[in-house]
Image (cartoon, rainbow, N blue to C red):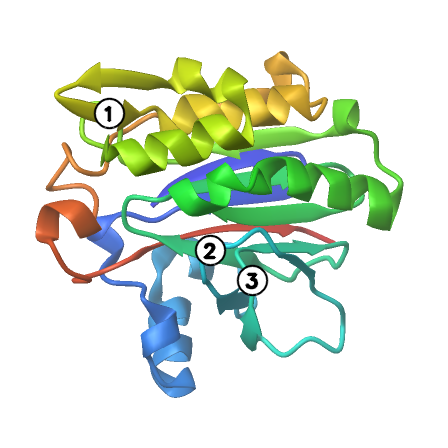
Amino acid sequence: MKIFEDQKIIAAFSDTSDGDLSFYNMPSEKVAEIWKNLPDVGANALAWPTYGHQVHQDRVFQVTENTPFFLSEKTDGLITSLTDRPIGVFSADCLPVLIWCDQAIAAVHAGWRSACMNIAARAVEQFSELFQVKPAGLKALIGPCIGQCCLEMGDEVYQQFIEADPAWQRFFKKMGKWHLDLRGLNRWQLLQAGVLETDINDFNHCTYCNEKQFFSFRRQRQRNGSMFSFIVRRG
């Protein structure tokens, strides 16, 4: 697990050394056991995480004190002002984006479908709408995902992106098929939403290429494991 700290913020990206963290497919008892036995979780005395039912859309759900830890809500993003309440998203090629400020935190699951809906910008908007935080006051951490080297797309997907925003053409490269720079696109979307370039950092690894370190849906050609990326604001 890769841990990043920024004052009271702890942000983390799991990898294969942490095992399969597909909590959405597990009973709550097993989730609790796996979670508490993760070394970094124990070292920081972290509470159970909150996560949603990811459906490759652009909804960003607000987590409050009344929100259950194991959500049935269909959402690809979570945002909260609560302290000591980890929130997270699952990935096995899709891009996890963790965003924070002094008042709130967010976790975003940006697969290509959600990226085409500009979910990163939607999360930034939620900071403004819910907590009156300007985009320039946010920090973002972009996690491991499938790289442009390996993310092949058909002509119909390329066309879908261009119809959504012609400027996104720059993140495609023709190498037989179209290849999408999912990381670069989400970084651009954060910048266009008003987040400062100096406040966006990358944990830049291709999940497809790095077989020993990351699960990859495309490489495995099925769901054989998920990483869990989470963020928490300490009280």
Where on the picture, by quarter, is residue 38?
Answer: bottom left
Q: Amino acid at mark 2?
A: Val
Mark identifier at residue 75: 3
Residue 60 place in picture, x, y as percent: 64, 55
Rounded to the nearest angstrom, the CA distance separating label 3 from label 1 is 28 Å
Q: Can I make out residue 134 in this image?
A: yes
Residue 11 place in picture, x, y as percent: 52, 43
Residue 77 place in picture, x, y as percent: 57, 54
Could you tell me which residue is drawn at 40 percent across and 68 percent down? Answer: 35
Where on the picture, by quarter, is residue 157?
Answer: top left
Rounded to the nearest angstrom, the CA distance separating label 1 from label 2 is 27 Å
Q: On screen, 231 above or below 101?
A: below
Q: Secondary structure at mark 2?
A: strand
Q: Amino acid at mark 1?
A: Trp
Residue 169 place in picture, x, y as percent: 42, 18
Residue that numbered label 2 is attached to? 89
Residue that numbered label 1 is attached to? 178
Q: Secondary structure at mark 1?
A: strand
Could you tell me which residue is drawn at 22 percent across and 16 percent down? Answer: 174
Q: Residues within 10 Å of mark 1 (few under 14, many from 20)?
A: some
Q: Is residue 37 left or right of residue 129?
A: left
Rounded to the nearest angstrom, the CA distance separating label 3 from label 2 is 10 Å
Could you tell me which residue is drawn at 39 percent across and 41 percent down? Answer: 112
Asked if the residue at tag 2 contacts the one at tag 1, i.e. Cβ–Cβ closer than 8 Å, the answer is no
Q: Amino acid at mark 3?
A: Thr
